[in-house]
Image (cartoon, coloured by chain):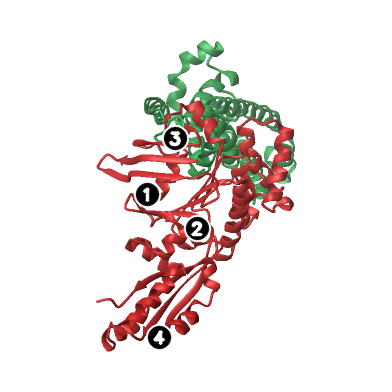
Chain colours: A green, B red
């Protein structure tokens, strides 16, 4: 990523634009790293919890291998409830919880808590959709060979859905980049905080534009990485 | 090998109950290829899926080998399923695995040690003629090759029984034939019992020893394939047979025989011959022996599984007594006779 930043800076229009404001470079670099750190950890954690939750949502559905209407309805309800709260409100709502977990609600580490908690239900639904694309015949074939539900999950659902799940990771990461900017407004650190304090409160275009450019590059990079990884798997199978 | 007793399956939807199988009883013997034929919606798919409990029967019992499959708990059912192979119309191969890994799949499920499993996979790929495609992915194979992988996979755990759910219905006629040949070979080599369902009488004709016709959730006719072809009892069966083998005399000929000739001096008969007698010159022998005329109106010869099978429609003209004697002679040669212009 530092390559991308130096590329942006070395552009001649940009150096004249920055003029004497070279402090911007180091601020943007630090904020970029904070964003990558927050989003990276939050994405990882949201999959640690969201992937199993998605598996449970799929497999407990009617007629599926672990059919359980009660579990399915309750989890589905919770997922929908969390997803219906706008992130900016959710962020404030769970401040007490964030304090318990991290000790503070300000800063990069603290932002990871709301980011992760908001992303878990989102991830669960994405995973659910990926798994539902798998033909039922494949599951049935595995069952006809005597597979246990666990074997169906590990040997059929997960490997078959892998390209689709990888694309889901890209979507989640990109969403979290956006969320992290919102978290930045209430002191979450990263590019959001930088843009808010310098760009919004002080009208410093000189900060605003590099921030936006870095965000665009980040999002493009994540999407390309996701597309590339998914294509590598599907091309091999094609 | 399989004993189905009073099997009933009712699907309950919020608005109605659908009877899919109505008191079905059937026996399949060890080592035979047994076919179940029916139109779509007749219940054949439900029936075959009850045998490995992919569908839970509403009532009735199914014995596979010496195990009552309908009475097993989950754990025992999984073990039992490992010994019942199944192949599917749409193959159901895992796109994430190579051919080799697909065949390996049931062995992983059964927790067969890797070395042993790999050896087994190689044997199976050789059996189905796909040694050179071991590292291909299913998407790179033709339909026939995919079904060969399906067959290899179904045989991996040395099953007692192979279930075939419309396995050739998505294949072209030539590929269908080669898959059916493979099933016949496997049946002979391994003495493996095969139960298949199909809507295509050709499949029954090519490979089955016995057949059951299912119509409107019930088994309406069961028997040896040759007997059923020679003497179908109900209209459903007849229409299935006429789809693959023309046994109907053209209407004009029947009309002429019925109106322009006397039923005493002219008999219109259909002879069905099966197996060795198809090669004997019975008709010319009969003509010489009884001094009657025989006019061949219509005929065809085909093969049912590996047995020659045919039918011939004759107009026999002569003294009534002689005609009756001639017919008795034909009957004595083991031919099935049906008089078409009896009043």
Q: Quadrant of residue B27?
A: top left
Return the disc, 4 or 1, that comes first in the chain's sequence. Answer: 1
Q: Nearer the viewer, mark 2 or mark 1?
A: 1
Q: Measure how far apart labels 4 and 2 are at the Cα level.
A: 48 Å
| Disc number lying in front (4 or 2) | 4
- Answer yes or no: is residue A179 visible: no
Residue at mark 2 shares a chain with residue at mark 1 = yes
In percent of width and height, residue B338 lies at 36, 71
Dot 4 or dot 2: first in sequence order is 2
Q: Element under label 1? A: loop
Q: Of the numbered discs in the image, which one, if any, rests on residue B1?
A: none
> Which residue is more in the foreground, A64 or B224?
B224
The chain that hosts pointer 2 is B
Chain letter of disc 1 in the image? B
User: Answer yes or no: do the residues labelled 3 and 1 have beta carbons within 8 Å?
Assistant: no
Which disc is residue A64 wearing?
3
Task: State the quadrant of the N terminus of chain A.
Answer: top right
Query: Mark 4 vs mark 3: same chain?
Result: no
Q: Are marks 2 and 1 in contact (CB under 8 Å)?
A: no
Which structural element holds mark 3? loop
Reading the image, the residue beneath label 4 is: B292
Which residue is denoted by mark 2 in the rendering?
B169
Find the distance from the CA under tag 2 to the CA under tag 1: 16 Å
Labels 3 and 1 positioned on one and the same chain: no
Circle 1 residue:
B43
Residue drawn at x 41%, y 40% is B4
- Mark 4 vs 2: CB contact within 8 A: no
């Amino acid at each position: 990523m530092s390559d991308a930043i130096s590329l942006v800076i070395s552009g001649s229009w940009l150096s004249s634009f920055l003029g004497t404001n070279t402090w911007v470079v180091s601020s943007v670099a630090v904020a970029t790293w904070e964003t990558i750190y927050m989003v990276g950890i939050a994405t990882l954690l949201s999959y640690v919890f969201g992937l199993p939750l998605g598996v449970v949502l799929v497999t407990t559905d009617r007629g599926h291998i672990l059919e359980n209407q009660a579990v399915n309805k309750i989890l589905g309800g919770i997922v929908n409830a969390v997803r219906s709260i706008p992130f900016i409100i959710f962020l404030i709502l769970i401040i007490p919880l964030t304090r318990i977990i991290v000790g503070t609600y300000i800063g990069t580490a603290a932002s990871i808590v709301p980011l992760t908690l908001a992303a878990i239900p989102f991830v669960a639904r994405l995973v659910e959709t990926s798994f539902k694309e798998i033909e039922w015949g494949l599951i049935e074939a595995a069952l006809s060979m005597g597979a246990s539900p666990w074997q169906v999950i590990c040997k059929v659902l997960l490997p078959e859905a892998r390209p689709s799940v990888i694309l889901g990771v890209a979507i989640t990461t990109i969403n979290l980049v956006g969320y992290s900017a919102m978290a930045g407004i209430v002191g979450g650190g990263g590019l959001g905080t930088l843009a808010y304090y310098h760009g919004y409160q002080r009208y410093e275009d000189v900060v605003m534009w590099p921030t936006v450019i870095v965000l665009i590059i980040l999002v493009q990079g994540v999407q390309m990485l996701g597309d590339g990884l998914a294509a590598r798997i599907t091309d091999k199978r094609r | 090998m399989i004993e189905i007793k009073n099997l009933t399956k009712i699907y309950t939807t919020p608005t109605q109950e659908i009877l899919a199988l109505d008191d079905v009883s059937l026996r399949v013997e060890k080592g035979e290829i047994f076919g179940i034929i029916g139109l779509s919606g007749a219940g054949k798919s439900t029936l075959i899926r009850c045998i490995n409990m992919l569908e839970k029967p509403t009532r009735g019992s199914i014995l596979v080998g010496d195990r009552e499959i309908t009475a097993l708990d989950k754990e025992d059912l999984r073990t039992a399923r490992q010994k019942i192979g199944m192949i599917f119309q749409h193959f159901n191969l895992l796109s994430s695995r190579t051919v080799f890994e697909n065949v390996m799949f049931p062995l992983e499920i059964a927790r067969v040690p890797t070395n042993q499993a790999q050896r087994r996979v190689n044997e199976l790929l050789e059996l189905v003629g796909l040694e050179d495609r071991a590292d291909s992915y299913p998407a790179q194979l033709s339909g026939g090759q995919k079904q060969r992988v399906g067959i290899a996979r179904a045989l991996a755990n040395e099953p007692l029984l192979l279930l075939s759910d419309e396995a050739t219905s998505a294949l072209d006629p030539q590929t269908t034939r080669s898959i059916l040949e493979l099933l016949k070979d496997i049946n002979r080599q391994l003495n493996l019992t095969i139960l298949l369902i199909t809507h295509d009488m050709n499949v029954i004709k090519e490979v089955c020893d016995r057949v059951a016709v299912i119509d409107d959730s019930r088994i309406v006719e069961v028997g040896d394939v040759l007997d059923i072809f020679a003497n179908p009892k109900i209209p459903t069966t007849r229409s299935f047979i006429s789809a693959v083998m023309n046994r109907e005399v053209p209407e004009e000929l029947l009309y002429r025989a019925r109106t322009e000739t006397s039923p005493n001096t002219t008999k219109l008969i259909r002879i069905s011959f099966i197996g060795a007698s198809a090669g004997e010159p019975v008709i010319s022998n009969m003509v010489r022996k009884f001094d009657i005329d025989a006019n061949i109106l219509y005929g065809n010869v085909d093969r049912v599984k590996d047995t020659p099978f045919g039918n011939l429609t004759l107009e026999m003209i002569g003294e009534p007594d002689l005609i009756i004697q001639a017919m008795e002679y034909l009957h004595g040669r083991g031919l099935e006779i049906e008089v078409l212009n009896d009043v």
